[in-house]
Image (spheres, rainbow, N blue to C red):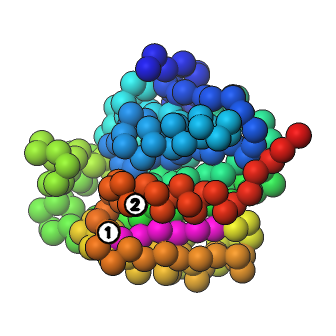
Amino acid sequence: MQPAIHSGPNGAIAYERLAGHGPTVVFLGGLRSDMTGTKASFLRDWCTARGQAFLRFDYTGHGASEGRFEEGSIGAWAADALSVIGAVTTGRLILVGSSMGGWVMLEAALAIPDRVAALVGIAAAPDFTEELMWDSFDDDQREALARDGIVTLPNPYDPAGYPIGRALIEDGRTRLRLRRTIPLTCPARLLHGQRDAEVPWDTSLRLAERLAGEDVAVTLIKDGDHRLSREADLALLAQTLSTLGEDRP
């Protein structure tokens, strides 16, 4: 796949858009992931088979897009999402957010609520910079972040670890969503594995409680891990999306 390029607010954003009927399914990936991953590729094929419009892209500092990962933040990546969505899509959207993308999903939906037909979270991780990073940092890590502006965290998906910049922590602190009502009333479906070793599954329960809408459902997969990329997990994702309706001429 040769991605198209959009000039976004933080640099060039690589993306792929497929034409089709609405709502456009927009995939928002996780921290350090890119649009060639299993779930993004599955959704591309699923939408193609249905003739449904689809968009996937790489945040700046990720994949084929410009930028340095350690300079990024939730706000910057939400701005990336809103920029490419505004430039290449029309009509209603189904935002599908995986892990960190679940937080970006909320930020984007809060900015353009009238366009959002539904939300689908896959191990959605709002507030992770505070609850899963900062709160677990030891004194040395906090001092390194203050002194150097960066701290490298171990990660099971990358032996080199993840370089976490000060901007990610400080910006995230201004966007915490699980401490008050989230004024979104569109349908929301939240999928979470109970063997998720990265994001506690009760995060999706807390998110469901905070969303203002009533049409909110949480599906827990007892043997599911963080990625939810097995064949059965992807089938569940497809089934979930198929219940959210289509726009037809």
For the point 41% across and 80% down, the residue is: 202
Neighbor class of circle 1 (other Cα within 10 Å; few <14, some 14-19, many 20+) is many
Along the line of sight, the residue nearer the viewer: 37 or 212: 37
In which quarter of the view is residue 18 placed?
top right
> Which mark, residue 93?
none
> Residue, x 45% and y 43% (percent of image)?
42
Which residue carries the number 1 mark? 224
Q: Secondary structure at mark 1?
A: loop
Residue drawn at 54 percent across, 55 percent down: 238
Which one is earlier in the sequence, the residue at label 1 or at label 2? 1
Q: Nearer the viewer, residue 147 or 221?
A: 221
Residue at screen point 63% across, 68% down: 188
At label 1, the amino acid type is Gly
Considering the image in quadrants, where does the N terminus appear? top left
How many labels, in total? Answer: 2
Secondary structure mostly taken by the magenta-highlighted segment of the chain: strand
Judge by depth and name the residue closer to the eye, 76 or 123. Answer: 123
Vertical position of residue 173 compared to residue 47: above or below: below
Asked if disc 1 and disc 2 are in contact, CB closer than 8 Å, the reply is yes
User: Within the image, what quadrant is residue 229 found in?
Assistant: bottom left
Q: Is residue 189 magenta?
A: yes
Q: What segment carries the magenta color?
A: 188-193
Tag shown at residue 233: 2
Q: Quadrant of residue 130?
A: bottom left
Amino acid type of the residue that numbered disc 2 sits on in the rendered structure: Asp
Question: As displayed, is residue 219 above or below residue 249?
Answer: below
In reply to whether residue 7 is colored magenta, the answer given is no
In the displayed structure, does residue 57 sit left or right of residue 222?
right
Q: Residues within 10 Å of mark 2 (few under 14, many from 20)?
A: many
Q: Establish if 68 lies above or below 43.
A: above
